[in-house]
Image: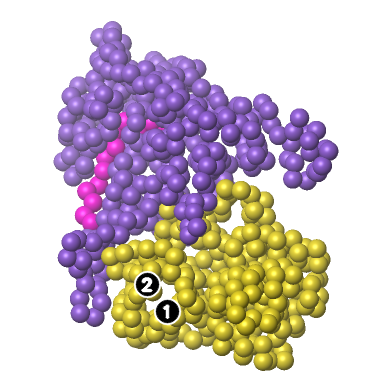
Amino acid sequence: MITPSIKVMDRVILERNHFQKLIDVLITRDYRVVGPTLGEGAIVYDELNSVDKLPIGWTDDQDGGTYRLKKRSDQALFGYVVGPHSWKKFLLPSALRLWQAKRHDNGFQIIPENEEIQKFAFIGVRSCDIHAVSTQDKIFMNGQHIDPHYQSRRKDAFILAVNCGKADGTCFCVSMNTGPKVTFGFDLAVTEILEDNNHYFVVEVGTELGAEILHEVTYREANGREKKLADGIIKNTARQMGRVMDTTNIKDLLYKNYEHPRWDDVAKRCLTCANCTMVCPTCFCTTVEDVTDLTGDHAERWRKLDSCFTMDFSYIHGGSIRASTKSRYRQWMTHKLAAWIDQFGMSGCVGCGRCITWCPVAIDITEEVRAIRENEMIDTSTISGKEKTNAIA
Amino acid sequence: MLPNPFHIQRLQKETYDTFTVELTPTNSTNTFLFSAGQFNMLYVFGVGEVPISISGDPARTETIKHTARAVGTVTRALQKLKSGDMLGVRGPFGSHWPVEESVGNDVVIIAGGIGLSPLRPVLYQLIAQRKKYKKIALLYGVRTPEDLLYKRELEQWRGRFDIEVKITVDTATGDWCGDVGVVTTLIRRVQFDPLHAMAMICGPEVMMRFTIKELQNCGVGNERIFISMERNMKCGIGLCGHCQCGPTFICKDGPVFRYDRIKEFFGKREI
C-alpha cells in the first residue's frame, strides 16, 4: 500500500487489524505502553503489550456510588469511559522514595534517587484526562518550583487519545468544557468506528512524533464519509452526559458561601474516606514519611499521595485545622472548583465523574453545587444584626 | 528538594520548652542568605522534617538560628541534639516582613509567645538601620514570665532610648512586677502615627485576630498590617497542598501576608 505523507492535524484511517502494530512500534521505540485493561472488577490502567489485553467488547455502567462492567454487543476496543484509575497512577505514583540517607561518624549523608524512568506511552487517554494531565503539568512543571519526579515521567510521554464513543451516568465534561472531543495535548487521537463489516479508527495527528509513529504502522486516507461518521460519534457522546454542572461565577459562588447550611448537610453523608481524592485525576496532594531501618543507620524519605479528607492533613501543634467533616468536604470542593482558579488559572474539575461514581455514599459534586446555587446565601459579613437574621431566614 | 547538611554549633535552652539552635553549613564556604520572616525545613535524621522560622540576624550569613518549641516528635528529637550533630536543611522558603517598605514609617511589632522568633530578624534589621525608621515599638505578650524568649536581648532593647518595649503576661508568677493582661492592651499605650505606621504581627491566630481588630480601631489600615501564618507543611514549595488557606499556599505565598490580601480567609473557622 502506498501511504501518503501525513502532517499534524491530518485525519487518516487506522484499521482495527493494525492496532497491534501500533503497540509494537511503541514497544520497539522503547516505550512502556500502558492503557486500559480488565482488572479488580473494573477497567484499570496497566501494562499493555498486546491489543488483546484491552477490555475488548466490554463497557461500564456508572452512576452515583455504582460501577458495573457489562458486555457489549460488539468488539469495540474503547467502548467504555474512565474507571477508578487515572494517569496520575504513573505520573504521580502513590508511593515514591525521594532519597535515602546513611549515618556516618560526623552525621549523615543524603543519597539522591537515581531514577531511570522508561518513557510512557499512554493508550486510550480521554479528553477529560488530557485536561487533568495538563492541569497537573501546570502545577508540577509550570510554577515557581518544578517537581523533577513528575517532570521525568511526563516529559517524554506519548499520548494516544480516544474521543469517547459514549458518555456515562456520571460524565459532565461538556459542562466543564473539557470534552468529549480531544482538542490538544495528544500525539494521536482516535475515534473508533464499528460498522457492519468494518472496524477502524479515524486518527487525528497531533504531533510530528505521532505522524512518524503512524507512518511506521500503516494507515490509509480517510474519506469524507468516515470523517463525518467520526464527528457524529463525538457529537452524539456530547448529548449523553449523565450530569450537568453550572459553572457560572462558580468561584465567587463558593467563596461567598463558606457558611452555607449545605456543608452541614453533606457532612452528614460524607464518610471522609478520601475515595474522591484518590480517584480524582487532578488531586495532587502528597505527604512525606521519614523512615529508618532497625539499625537506625539507614533512613529514607517517601512521598505518598495524601488526602485533605484525613484528620492528619491539616495537623499542626495543638490539633487539626480542619477537624470537622464539614470543613474537609468544603475544603476539597471549594479548592477544586474555586481556589484552583486563583491558584492555577483553571478549574480543578475536569468533569470525569469519578468522584461521583466512586463515592461509597454517592455524594455528587454537581448536586452539591446545585444545592448551594439554588439557595445561595447573601454574604453576611458586611451586614449585621437584624438584617443578618432576615437574610438567613 | 534534597536537604543540605548543616552542623549544630550551639543548642541553647530559651525556656522550659523552647530552644534556639544555631547551625553552620557543613561545607563552610557556603553562606546562608535569608529575609526576615522566612523559614526552613529542618530534618532530624530518621525522625522527620518540620518547618521552623529563622530567628537570627539576616546580616550574619555564616550561621543560621532557629527557635522552636519542643511540642512534636521532630522538635523533641531536635531539642535532644548536641553541638556537632548534623541536621538537614531545606530553604529558605516563603515571603518576608516589609522591612524595606517600612523605611520612613513608625514600626509596631506585636508578638505572642514564640511568635517573637520570626520577628527577631526584623528587630535586628531595624536596629542596624535605626535612623531610617521613626518610632519603633515592640509589644510582646506571653502566658507567664517563664515563657519569655530572648530575655537578655529584651533587656538590651528595653535599655535603648530609641525603641519602646512593652511586655505583658497573661498570668503573673513569682516576682513578676510588669504588666498583666493580653497583648492587645498594650497597643493603646504606645504612641504611633496610625496613618504612617507599619504593624507586623506573629502569634497564635486568635491573638492575631484581636490584635488586628485593635489596630484597626486605632486607625491602622489593613494594607499596613502584616501577619505571619502557620499551617501543616510538607514540601515548602507549594506542591504538596497541605498548607492551603483559601487560594493561598502559606509556604510560598506566605507565611507573611499583608492583611488586606488574606482577610477574606483569615479568621474563618476551619479554612
How did the renderer colour the structure?
A: by chain
Q: Find disc 2 in the rendering and name its residue.
A: B78
> Quick one: which chain is yellow?
B
**Residue at mark 1: chain:** B
Does residue B265 show up?
yes
* Secondary structure under the numbered disc 2 in the rendered image: helix
> Which residues lie in the magenta part?
A115-130
Q: Is residue A102 above or below residue A171?
A: below
Residue A83 left/right relative to B248: left
State the quadrant of the N terminus of chain B: bottom left
Q: Is residue B56 on the magenta stretch? A: no
Query: Of the residues shown, which amino acid type is indicated by label 1?
Result: Val
In terms of sequence position, does the residue under pointer 1 or pointer 2 come before the other? Answer: 1
The label number, if any, that marks residue B21 in the structure image: 1
Q: Mark 1–mark 2 contact, CB under 8 Å?
A: yes
* Secondary structure under the numbered disc 1 in the rendered image: strand
Q: Residue furthest right?
A: A386
Q: Residue at x 54, y 27 (%)?
A: A366
> Quick one: which chain is purple?
A
Q: Residue at x 30, y 59 (%)?
A: A290
Q: Residue furthest front?
A: B174
